Image (tube, rainbow, N blue to C red):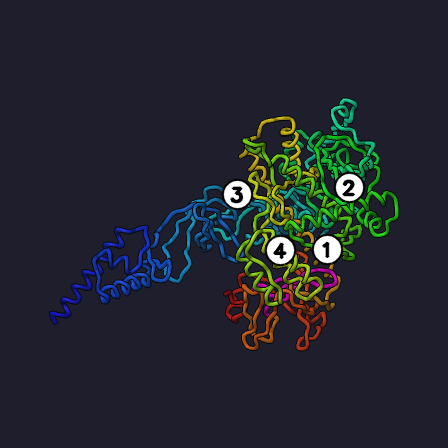
């Protein structure tokens, strides 16, 4: 009895000493060996007891196990600030400012914070095996929130039905705040308040876009959804209309006059804004002077004017399926700045002395006056390359030879060769897509591309390479970081399955050459789409910045955007900086320039999202005319809710819901981009060929659903297809699927 009492006292004393040690180490981590040494326990039995006690404390939630056998005190009721992320499926979260950690916030603890709001949260203590959770205690800064949807107006009230991924509820609108909106109208609504005790927020209509379903309405809704301007301010248009071309003798005298040199443009057949032209002149020694001439937009658009501010805010022109939303007013972009044929134009030029074989011997940069004498479409230029016949065929063939030499040198130096087909639609007068065609990059496209790349590269190096003992001046670079190592390793692993070797270590040049070899080897093979898609996904996104790290994908040490100032604001920034520095001006404020770079990068991404959304909308609209038809396709995406399939015939993409795969019980393998059947181990993998039937086309949600067709699943009638529900992911659907064991995360 006495022995048991003494043992208990010993255990109690050891535990007290452990508790004292932990209390005195509130922020540090520790294991049982560290604790044992600190409190003077040396025997194996005593250390075993320490290990067991620490595990017990962790099980009770009094300690946090950060790694196997390693512990620390949980941070209880820790306050933090961050950005609120709202999701319509209820999986709200906050991304903390300090650590960038994403922490779950239940709806009951959200204070009705909206997506993007700056909030203060209290982070609860972690419990072993559970994810951390936070509670919003204050909304520090509310982000202006607008939502796009369809109005429904009843006798006493109105509300907006929205498909936003950031909001699960409809928005209540007082009838006095409708701005003339009617049931069935598409509208932009701003949330004005969200009472604590209310399920729905309240808002007001700030713009009525038109009747839902009409082409202009839906395209403007896509723009508004991404926060992009869909109308040009009248005040800016009026300011632009007052600008005259102004090519006076005085202006010409200040520039190099190249109007007598053979100059032409090569652009898409539907282009109206021509920002670049090429000139070619044979020299007495057999070499050529090739000019890359760019519209001198900044001669007309001065800093901080109403036109410049609008262009800076927009940052880019947006090329939607059926229209261009320009960065500059039409009078400038399609008029006095555009290098239209048989008109004198002010240009900013890079002039190269080149051998007939395409070797650059020297270059110079100058402000010029030029005159294009011919406007070529890509198709017309391609015809001259292929046949050697037609006006200016000799000049185009010479430039083509040079471009091919430049391209070969670029690939030899490590540039990655991605050659993706783009989908385009023929549109009728009402905006309805009537057919699909593919835009492929041919020699004429590549000719222009190579000379633009060359000009951009030279301009960047001109400023980026500082004279000895001097610091490079602040400049705008277009940079592209190295691929994500994990994604690259995963690509190599999957490529190996198909018999291709891919380098993941070595110099960027070696890795890129290896990628190019794989892309060339897979041309025309079943795995082409799969591996080329993964290769693209392994790459980082190119951005604008003042910090030059080079352009990995192109294999350039210095690169910028100089060649499209009509449609990109960074190019206007580059023009101004280049003119300033060539004239001997001092470096500009670095931080202000970096802020403008970041804004331009952000707007570029939004524009790309809007462009993809417009293509998706037209794809669904086009396929709505083909319900019930059967197509072959390639699996272009694999998710926990199903298979995305890209149709071979028209490149339209739709979803085969996972619940329609009734032959087995499928799990999502995110590492290997496939769904795996538990019973039969059948795999649906990215890049696999499948046959599908068009099942549903939801115009409101821009969603196309497909049904798998095989030996066990023959084509169905339209009535049978209409009886199926959409398999799109919502919180309810995902929850039901999980109960069935489908789409389990790994």
Kindly report the distance in space between the C-alpha atoms of the residues bearing marks 1 and 2: 20 Å
Crowdedness of circle 3 by 10 Å Cα count: few (<14), some, many (20+)? Answer: few
Which of discs 1 and 4 lies nearer the camera? The answer is 4
Crowdedness of circle 2 by 10 Å Cα count: few (<14), some, many (20+)? Answer: some
Q: Quadrant of residue 259?
A: top right
Q: Position of residue 377 (x, y in %)?
A: 81, 46
Q: Secondary structure at mark 3?
A: loop
Which residue range is magenta in the image? 636-659
Q: Which mark sits nearer the N-terminus, 2 or 3?
A: 3
Q: Residue at x 76, y 57 (%)?
A: 436
Residue placed under numbered mark 1 in the picture: 423
Q: Residue at x 67, y 53 (%)?
A: 417
Q: Position of residue 739 (x, y in %)?
A: 50, 70
Q: Secondary structure at mark 1?
A: strand
* Marks 3 and 4 close (CB-CB < 8 Å): no
* Marks 4 and 2 close (CB-CB < 8 Å): no
Kindly report the distance in space between the C-alpha atoms of the residues bearing marks 2 and 3: 37 Å
The secondary structure that most of the magenta stretch takes on is strand
Q: Which mark sits nearer the N-terminus, 4 or 2?
A: 2
Crowdedness of circle 1 by 10 Å Cα count: few (<14), some, many (20+)? Answer: some
Q: Nearer the viewer, residue 689 or 723?
A: 689
Residue placed under numbered mark 3 in the picture: 143
Q: Is residue 211 left or right of residue 105?
A: right
Residue placed under numbered mark 2 in the picture: 272
Name the outermost residue toward the left.
2
Q: Is residue 185 above or below residue 637?
A: above
* Marks 1 and 4 close (CB-CB < 8 Å): no
Residue placed under numbered mark 4 in the picture: 536
Q: Quadrant of residue 47?
A: bottom left
């Amino acid at each position: 009895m006495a022995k048991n009492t003494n043992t208990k006292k010993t255990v109690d004393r050891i535990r007290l000493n452990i508790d004292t040690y932990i209390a005195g180490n509130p922020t540090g981590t520790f294991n049982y060996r560290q604790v044992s040494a600190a409190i003077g326990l040396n025997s194996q039995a005593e250390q075993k007891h320490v290990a067991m006690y620490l595990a017990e404390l962790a099980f009770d939630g009094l300690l946090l196990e950060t790694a196997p056998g390693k512990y620390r005190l949980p941070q209880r009721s820790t306050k933090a600030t961050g950005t609120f992320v709202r999701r319509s499926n209820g999986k709200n979260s906050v991304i903390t400012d300090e650590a960038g950690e994403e922490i779950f916030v239940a709806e009951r603890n959200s204070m009705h914070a909206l997506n993007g709001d700056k909030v203060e949260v209290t982070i609860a203590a972690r419990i072993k095996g559970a994810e951390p959770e936070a509670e919003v205690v204050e909304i520090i800064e509310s982000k202006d929130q607008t939502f796009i949807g369809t109005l429904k107006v009843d006798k006493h009230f109105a509300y907006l039905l929205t498909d936003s991924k950031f909001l699960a509820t409809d928005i209540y609108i007082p009838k006095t705040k409708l701005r003339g909106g009617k049931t069935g109208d598409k509208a932009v609504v701003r949330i004005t308040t969200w009472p604590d005790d209310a399920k729905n927020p309240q808002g007001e209509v700030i713009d009525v876009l038109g009747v839902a379903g009409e082409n202009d309405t839906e395209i403007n809704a896509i723009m508004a959804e991404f926060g992009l301007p869909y109308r040009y301010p009248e005040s800016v248009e009026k300011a632009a209309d007052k600008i005259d071309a102004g090519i006076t003798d005085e202006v010409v005298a200040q520039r190099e006059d190249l109007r007598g040199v053979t100059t032409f443009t090569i652009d898409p057949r539907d282009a109206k804004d021509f920002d670049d032209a090429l000139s070619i002149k044979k020299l007495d020694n057999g070499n050529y002077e090739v000019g890359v001439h760019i519209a001198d937009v900044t001669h007309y658009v001065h800093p901080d004017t109403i036109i410049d501010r609008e262009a800076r805010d927009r940052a880019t022109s947006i090329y939607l399926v059926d229209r261009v939303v320009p960065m500059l007013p039409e009078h400038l972009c399609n008029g006095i700045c555009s290098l239209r044929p048989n008109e004198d134009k002010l240009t900013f030029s890079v002039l190269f002395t080149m051998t007939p074989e395409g070797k650059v011997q020297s270059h110079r940069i100058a402000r010029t006056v030029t005159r294009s004498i011919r406007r070529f479409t890509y198709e017309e230029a391609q015809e001259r390359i292929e046949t050697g016949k037609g006006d200016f065929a000799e000049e185009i063939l010479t430039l083509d030879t040079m471009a091919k030499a430049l391209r070969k040198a670029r690939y030899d130096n490590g540039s990655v060769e991605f050659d993706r087909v783009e989908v385009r639609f023929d549109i009728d007068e009402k905006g309805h897509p009537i057919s699909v065609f593919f835009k492929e990059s041919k020699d004429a496209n590549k000719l222009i591309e190579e000379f633009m790349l060359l000009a951009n590269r030279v301009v960047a190096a001109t400023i980026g390479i500082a004279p000895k003992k001097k610091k490079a001046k602040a400049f705008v670079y277009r940079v592209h970081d190295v691929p994500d190592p994990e994604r690259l390793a995963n690509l190599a692993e999957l490529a190996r399955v198909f018999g291709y070797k891919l380098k993941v270590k070595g110099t960027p040049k070696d890795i890129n050459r290896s990628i190019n070899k794989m892309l060339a080897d897979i041309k025309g093979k079943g795995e082409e789409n799969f591996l080329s898609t993964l290769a693209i996904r392994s790459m980082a996104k190119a951005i604008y910045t003042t910090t030059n790290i080079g352009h990995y994908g192109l294999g350039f040490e210095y690169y910028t955007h100089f060649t499209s100032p009509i449609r990109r604001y960074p190019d206007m920034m580059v023009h101004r900086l280049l003119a300033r520095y060539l004239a001997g001006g001092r470096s500009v404020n670095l931080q202000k320039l970096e802020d403008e770079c970041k804004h331009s990068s952000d707007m570029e991404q939004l524009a790309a999202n809007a462009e993809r959304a417009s293509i998706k909308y037209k794809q669904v609209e086009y396929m709505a005319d083909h319900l019930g038809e059967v197509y072959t396709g390639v699996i272009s995406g694999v998710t926990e809710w199903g298979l995305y399939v890209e149709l071979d015939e028209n490149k339209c993409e739709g979803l085969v819901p996972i619940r329609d795969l009734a032959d087995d019980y499928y799990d999502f393998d995110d590492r290997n981009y496939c769904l795996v059947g538990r019973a039969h181990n059948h795999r649906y993998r990215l890049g696999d060929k499948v046959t599908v039937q068009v099942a549903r086309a939801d115009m409101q949600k821009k969603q196309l659903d497909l049904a798998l067709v095989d030996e066990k699943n023959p084509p169905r009638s339209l009535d049978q297809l209409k009886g199926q529900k959409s398999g799109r992911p919502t919180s309810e659907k995902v929850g039901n699927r999980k109960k069935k064991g489908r789409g389990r995360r790994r």
